[in-house]
Each structure stands twice: as C-alpha cells, then as structure tokens.
Amino acid sequence: MGPLNGYTVLELAGIGPAPMGGMMLADMGAEVIRIERAIGASALHQKDVSSRGKKSVTINLKSAEGVETLLRMVENADVIIDPFRPGVCEKLGIGPEACMARNPRLIFARMTGWGQDGPLAHTAGHDINYIALTGALYAMGRKGQKPSPPLNLVGDMGGGGMLLAMGILAALLETSGSGKGQVIDAAMVDGTAQLMWMFHGWQHTGDYDATAREGNMLDGGAHYYDTYECADGEFVCIGAIEPQFYALLKAKMGLSEEEFGDQDNPAEWPRMKARLTEIFKQKTRDQWCELLEGTDACFAPVLSLLEAPAYPANVARNTYIEIDGMVQPAPAPRFSRTPSSVRNAGSVPGADTGSVLTAMGFAEQELAELMAAGAIA
C-alpha cells in the first residue's frame, strides 16, 4: 500500500500533465478514477502509460443526469483534477463552487498552460509556448542556431504534471488539519518559471549570460559539460564541474595541464571543446565507458529510449518495469515503509463504471436508469 492509500481522486480525462499528475498519485496508492466524458470513449488511453493504476468511469457530462452522477461521486472524493481551459467545468455545472458545495473538504486541482486568469488564460497553447515565455526555450540550443525544444519535458511534465502533484499533496496536508478544501491553480508557465530559479540567481550575480546560447556552463558552453561524438557515431557526456572531478577526468583521459588547465576561463572553452571533440572520436562509446564509467569523472553514455531500460545501473535499481509488454518508468520517488506500486495497466474506458458507482452508494436500479438515459456507459 502506497502512502496515499485511502485517498480518492477523480481525474477528468485530459492529455499530458494532468494525467501524469494522476499517475503519480495512483502509483502512490490513491484510488484514481478517470472520468471519460464521451460515451464510447477511445480505448487508445490503454496504451498511455499515465492510465496505469487507474479505474475508468464513463459519464456523459452534457446530460443533467451525468452531471448529478459526477457531483455524487465528488461527495466521496478527496481530489478532483480539472485539465480543461478556465471556465469549462463551470459551464458543465461541475466547477469548484458546485463541487465544493457537495464536499467542502474537496481539493479542486486545475491544470492549465497559462493559469486561471490573465490575458492568455483562454488561449490555446502547448509546452513550447509556455517555456518560450519564461526564458527556458531561449536558453536551449547551440550558438548561432535557433532554440531547440526539449521534447515536452519542461513545460508539460516538470512545470505541469509534477507541480500539480506537489500542489495536491500540499493541499491534502493542509486539509487534514483545517478540514477545509481549496482550489489549486497549477499553470505550466508558472511551473517552468519555478524551474528557472537558479538561472535568475546567476544572472543577478553575473554568473550567467541570459543573452547567450551555448555560452554558459550548463548550456553546452563549457567543454567539461557537454556531449561528444565517439568513433562509432554514438555519444557520451561529461559534467565534471567541480575541480576534483575535473582533475580526475583529466587524469583518466591523459589530458595535459598545459592544454586543459584553465578550466573556468570561458575564453578558453571553445579551444578546449574542439580538442575534446577530436579526442572523443578516437574511441568507441563502449571503450570510453570502459575507461570512465563508474568513476567520479561525471561521465555517462548517452542512451536512447530503447537502450535505457537495459542499462545495468537501471536494471539493478529497477528503474523501469514492464506491464503487459510495455516498458515504462517505475513509480518514483521510493518509500521505505509504504512503497508505491502499479496495480494495473489501465482499464478500458468505462470498464469500472458499475463497480465504482456501486461502491459509492448508487443502487442497481439507479445504475440501470442512468444507463438507459445515456448518462453513463
């Protein structure tokens, strides 16, 4: 049983960060019930890792009976996750006011890109747009080239899904003492701004140039913090920031003090990087692993998504699991006494409608009437 065993979360079906947040809560033991809006909802989400551990209930929220069904479920829930644009839940009759009237302890967690207010609140957007307005996207990429999108990891997942989960956990802690619920406004643009905290500090102290790309220590500007191509076309990376780690890297690679002594002089970085580029191409990735792996030189091979699950250190730590033939990351973080787990791969949409509603007090005759009215499936 995970640390959230006993908590019930209603997750209105969405994509990206909201389902990720729900997945994390399910991994930690919460009963997460995904509410599919449309009758005959697609079964594609069965192939979505974020559906793991969740139950699925299909409710037609465009019908009065469907709305009432959800509001009755809210009476039995601790959290509801809203993945829609601001105002959508209110239009459906399931906004914070309606839901918290049924359950004053409810945490109403809202996940959007731009937040619940402001000039962009009702505007469509995606990860790339959110991170563009925080300086994060501008900072990523090579010198003289255009900014490079970091998949949708920064805005959607780090600034979105994880922020949502953290907000829910904090609100549950507060509610356990106050007995009162509240609304969480989790915005991906806000979360991304949070992720940039360190660079704001460095910019203020003059240790970071926000106008440069590949001109700072952590953006590939420094020769000791970058990726390098090997003789076989594969890549490795080094991150030997601290002097003692840099010294070990030099010793292991046979780098002379004359060529690589001035570690933190940005004027020398391009020359030293060019030299390291030549050196790393002299061996294959496996050969560099044999020399540097497992040392404090801050070295690692750059693995593909397909290679990562089989990497020995990942295997030893059980970083990945396989469910119904699908390889996916294991639950995180890890708990010593109440470990997280994945209970199932995810239900077919609507598969748990009857059992969930019955457990929440709906009578058999009520379920039959709701089914006949097209309010549930």
Image (tube, grey):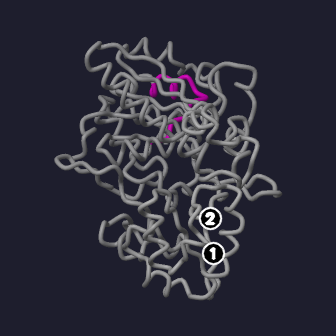
Taking the image as drawn, is residue 34 in sight? yes
Indicate the position of residue 281 as horizontal and vertical percent values: 64, 84
- Mark 2 = which residue? 223
Which of 194 and 182 lies nearest the eye of the viewer? 194
Quarter occupied by residue 194: top right
Which of 142 and 111 lies nearest the eye of the viewer? 142
Q: Are marks 1 and 2 in contact (CB under 8 Å)?
A: yes
Residue 104 colored magenta?
no
Farthest residue to the front: give it.
258
Indicate the position of residue 15 as horizontal and vertical percent values: 58, 45
Please give the name of the residue rendered at 67% of the width and 81% of the height, measured from the top-left corner: 278
Q: Which residues are magenta?
A: 57-70
Q: Which amino acid, by three-letter code, is at mark 1?
A: Leu
Please give the name of the residue rendered at 51% of the width and 74% of the height, measured from the top-left corner: 301
Q: Is residue 129 above or below residue 151?
A: above
Q: Is residue 315 left or right of residue 152?
A: left
Please give the name of the residue rendered at 40% of the width and 59% of the height, measured from the top-left corner: 345
Quarter occupied by residue 233: bottom right
Indicate the position of residue 124 as horizontal and vertical percent values: 74, 35
Q: Which mark is residue 125?
A: none
Q: Which amino acid, by three-letter code, is at mark 2?
A: His
Q: How many marks?
A: 2
Q: Is residue 31 above or below residue 213?
A: above
- Mark 1 = which residue? 276
